[in-house]
């Protein structure tokens, strides 16, 4: 079989293991450097002499770039071959990592983060789209489970390694450590990556791209800016960004439904289990990212732990989540999503309720156990709901479905973190107003604790909303699709 082929038919075979290794290695390193840098933000504020509002842009800019680029990915998947997009994503990631490793100022590091985000924005939709094509429907749960292992294990070890590198070397080594692995992934992909997608080259609609950029970019920018704490939700910057984003998204949606070849085919939303899957992923990302922002913050600020110690406390939960992802994938293939997603959301809600009672006197063992249970719940919800939703889509909707899923993950991340920070800040302010002596260190700790507890209550409410929605989830019937593929293969053999 020629690896340069771009036309897919039912009789085509794929070298699954080399393709998976190429995608997983590059995805692992990309996500590792993303979360590892979050632990280094406090160190960067001192070294680069910048404020918390400024350093926040290293995360905000990353999310903003993804929010703009990922919606276009569905179009790119139909214009360029798998190999072309894979190589392009790795080149952007390598360039961004190299620039970050050499940077000595905030401005250069910000440019590096944008380049890295472009690489990730190209890679993630490509990864999920490829999985949908090279694996039969009845085995996608296991394949998505392996993807889940990588997606969750990389963020798990990122903070620990970052803390170790910061204490012994410098934050630059987060990127120097990633660079050789990205080069290996690029070489491996050039040798073994196959073209799996069908190239249809739909028309580039500049108006749709403009509406998409303003819409998703405005929403992500608005929520991220509100979370910075400068003026909060009432600031002119936030209101204008959100207004532009909402209007542009409405215009974008109207235009997509009026086009014969839309940039993103929003008709994917007519499939009910895809809608439920999108909502589950959205809610799960809000819970994960809001919790993973406020918990390390409390460990380091409220409980006076070092970055390394905080990373070590979060490590067991991340490892458990990664190890369980393939298991959940196999259970999904066997039993479907209902008996995983509903119990998983119950676990999330209960654990977040316990987290809402956290104080500076809470033991390290309790935090490790709660965080591990939180990650177990996430493993039970995220990949099964996502896979079940994508399974209901016809093949021609795969690029659109993966683009929608990945775009809304970035939006959910921005919304979840912004709301969590805002609720935490409001809780701190309210506590300080009633404090006898706000200048006392005990008052500052009490205010932070009250704010963190309120943020966890918010995450718990989000999980409960997800639980209500999950009651409508059902397994997608894959028999018809499997039989159709088998008939085509038998006919071809005959």
Image: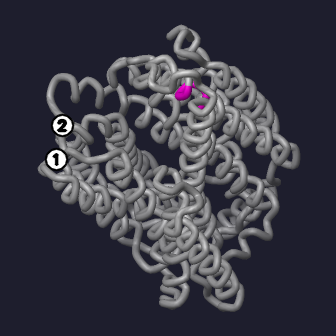
Range covered by the magenta-colored residues: 447-451
Residue placed under numbered mark 1 in the picture: 101
- Give the alpha-carbon distance from disc 1 to disc 2, as whole Å: 7 Å
Relative placement, left or right, of 13 versus 24 is right
- Residue 448: say if magenta: yes
In the displayed structure, 20 sits above or below 456; it is: below
> What x and y, as percent, mark residue 274?
74, 59
Q: Nearer the viewer, residue 417 or 86?
A: 417
The N terminus, quarter of image: bottom left
> What x and y, as percent, mark residue 397?
65, 71
Q: Nearer the viewer, residue 405 or 490?
A: 405
Numbered circle sitting on residue 331: none
The C terminus, quarter of image: bottom right
- Residue at 87 percent of width and 49 percent of height: 472
> What x and y, as percent, mark residue 10?
60, 67
Callout 2 secondary element: helix
Q: Quadrant of residue 359?
A: top right
Relative placement, left or right, of 211 versus 110 is right
Which tag, 1 or 2, sits closer to the chain's start?
Answer: 1
Residue placed under numbered mark 2 in the picture: 173
- Callouts 1 and 2 close, C-beta under 8 Å: yes
- Dot 1: few (<14), some (14–19), or many (≥20) neighbours within 10 Å? many
């Amino acid at each position: 079989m020629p690896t340069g082929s771009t036309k897919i038919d039912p009789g085509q075979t794929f070298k699954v293991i080399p393709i998976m290794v190429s995608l997983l290695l590059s995805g692992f390193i990309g996500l590792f450097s993303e979360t590892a840098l979050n632990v280094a933000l406090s160190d960067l504020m001192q070294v680069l002499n910048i404020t918390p509002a400024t350093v926040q842009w290293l995360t905000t800019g990353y999310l903003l770039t993804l929010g703009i680029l990922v919606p276009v990915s569905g179009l790119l998947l139909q214009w360029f071959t798998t190999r072309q997009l894979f190589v392009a994503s790795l080149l952007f990631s390598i360039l961004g990592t190299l620039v970050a490793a050499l940077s000595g100022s905030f401005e250069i590091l910000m440019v590096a983060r944008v380049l890295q985000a472009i690489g990730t924005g190209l890679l993630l939709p490509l990864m999920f789209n490829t999985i949908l094509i090279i694996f039969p429907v009845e085995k996608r749960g296991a394949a998505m489970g392996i993807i889940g292992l990588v997606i969750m294990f990389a963020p798990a070890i990122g903070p620990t390694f970052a803390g170790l590198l910061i204490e012994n070397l410098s934050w630059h080594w987060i990127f120097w450590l990633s660079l050789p692995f990205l080069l290996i992934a690029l070489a491996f992909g050039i040798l073994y990556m196959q073209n799996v997608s069908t190239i249809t080259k739909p028309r580039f609609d500049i108006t749709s791209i403009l509406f998409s950029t303003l819409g998703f970019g405005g929403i992500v920018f608005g929520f991220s800016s509100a979370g910075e704490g400068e003026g909060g939700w009432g600031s002119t910057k936030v209101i204008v960004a959100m207004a532009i984003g909402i209007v542009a998204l409405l215009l974008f949606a109207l235009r997509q439904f009026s086009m014969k070849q839309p940039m993103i085919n929003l008709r994917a939303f007519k499939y009910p289990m895809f809608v439920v899957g999108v909502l589950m992923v959205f809610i799960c990302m809000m819970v994960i990212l809001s919790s993973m922002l406020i918990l390390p913050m409390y460990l380091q600020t409220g409980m006076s732990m070092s970055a390394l110690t905080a990373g070590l406390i979060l490590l067991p939960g991340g490892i458990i989540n990664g190890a369980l992802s393939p298991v959940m994938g196999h259970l999904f293939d066997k039993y479907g999503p209902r008996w995983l997603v509903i119990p998983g959301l119950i676990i999330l809600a209960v654990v977040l309720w316990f987290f809402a009672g956290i104080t500076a006197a809470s033991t390290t063992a309790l935090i490790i156990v709660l965080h591990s249970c939180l990650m177990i719940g996430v493993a039970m919800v995220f990949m099964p709901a996502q896979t079940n939703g994508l399974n209901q889509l016809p093949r021609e909707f795969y690029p659109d479905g993966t683009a929608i899923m990945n775009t809304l993950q970035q939006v959910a991340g921005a919304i979840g973190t912004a709301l969590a920070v805002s609720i935490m800040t409001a809780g701190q302010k309210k506590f300080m107003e009633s404090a006898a002596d706000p200048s006392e260190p005990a008052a500052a700790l009490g205010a932070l604790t009250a704010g963190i507890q309120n943020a966890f209550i918010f995450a718990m409410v989000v999980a409960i909303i997800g639980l209500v929605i999950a009651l409508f989830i059902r397994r997608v019937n894959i028999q018809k699709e499997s039989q159709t593929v088998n008939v085509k293969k038998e006919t071809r053999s005959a």
